[in-house]
Amino acid sequence: MEFSRGQYRVRLACSAADVAAVQRLRHHAFRGCEGVDADRFDARCRHVMIEMPSDQRLVGTCRLQVLCDPAAVAGTYTAQFYDLAKLSRAFDRMMEVGRFCIERGVEPDALRLAWAALTRIVDAERVGLMFGCTSFAGTAPETHAAALAALAAGHLARPELQPGRLAREVVPLRDMPHDPRQALRQMPPLLRSYLAMGGWVSDHAVVDRDLGTLHVLTGVEIAAIPPTRARLLRADAV
C-alpha cells in the first residue's frame, strides 16, 4: 500500500530501516528526546509511515494489527491495561491501532492521510472494530478534568462493551460540570477524530508512568460510523 495526497505520502514499513525510523520518531514524540521506542509488540504489527517525499522526512506513524481470532485480543498491547473480554465476545475481526503520533505542525493533513490508510485496511480486511489506547500528555488528571468529564458525559462505551479494569493506577471518569469549549481544547486531535467517527471510551483512564501519559481505551465500531464521515474517509482512501 502506497499513495500520496498533496505534499504527503503514506506507505507501510517494508524494511528494518523503516521500522527503526518509526521507533525513533515515536521516542521523540512520546519522550521528547532522541532514542528508540521499541517493544515486543512491534514485530507483530504493520507500521504506517507518513512522509514528505520532498525531503524524505518521516512526519507521522502508527502501528496496527488485524485480529482475526477473538482470542488473540488478550495478547495485544491494550490488553495489558484493560480487560477486553467483552470486545472478544462481540466482534470477530478487530484492528488494534497504537503508537499514533504526528509531528507538530503537519496536522490535520497528515492525520487525514493516516486515516485514509487505515480505512483501506479496514475495508479490505472486513474489520468490525478499531480500538487502542488514546493518550493525554502528562499523568495529572486535573490537567484534563474538563475533557475527562465530557467523555464521561457523552462518550462512554455501552455496558456490553465496556472494558474492565486491569491497571494498577486508574482514574474513574465522572460526569461533572464542565466547560465544553475547554473540554474540546484539552482533547488530543486523535481522540477528537475517534469521537467524530462515533467512537467511545472506557469508563476510566489509566496512568502510564513509563510514557508519562494518561490514556483511555478508545473504540470505533465501523458499522456505526456516521454515513457522512464514512464517505469522507473512503473518499480520502481512494
Image (tube, helix red, strand yellow):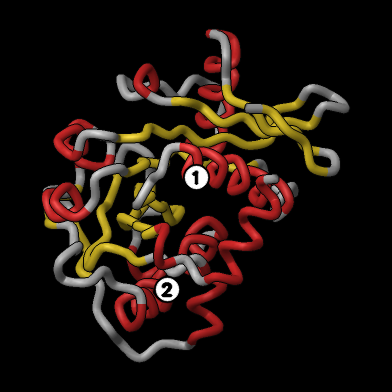
The residue depicted at 30 percent of the width and 87 percent of the height is: 176
Q: Which mark is residue 140?
A: none
Horizontally, residue 165 falls left or right of residue 142, namely left
Rendered image quadrant of residue 193: bottom right
Task: Choose between 232 and 205: the one closer to the eye.
Answer: 232
Q: Amino acid at mark 2?
A: Ala
Q: Is residue 180 above or below residue 115?
A: below
Q: Amino acid at mark 1?
A: Asp
Rendered image quadrant of residue 37: top left
How many numbered markers are drawn? 2
**Pointer 1: residues within 10 angstroms few (<14), some, or many (20+)?**
few
Q: Is residue 209 above or below residue 13?
A: below
Counting residues from the N terminus, which is met first, the one under dot 2 or under dot 1?
1
Q: Residue furthest top?
A: 16
The residue depicted at 24 percent of the width and 50 percent of the height is: 91
Quick one: SS at disc 2? helix
The residue depicted at 60 percent of the width and 71 percent of the height is: 228
Circle 2 is placed at which residue position?
Answer: 147
The residue depicted at 55 percent of the width and 70 percent of the height is: 227
Residue 52: where, in percent of width, then height?
A: 79, 32
Q: Is residue 146 visible?
A: yes
Q: Is residue 186 visible?
A: no
Circle 1 is placed at which residue position?
Answer: 123
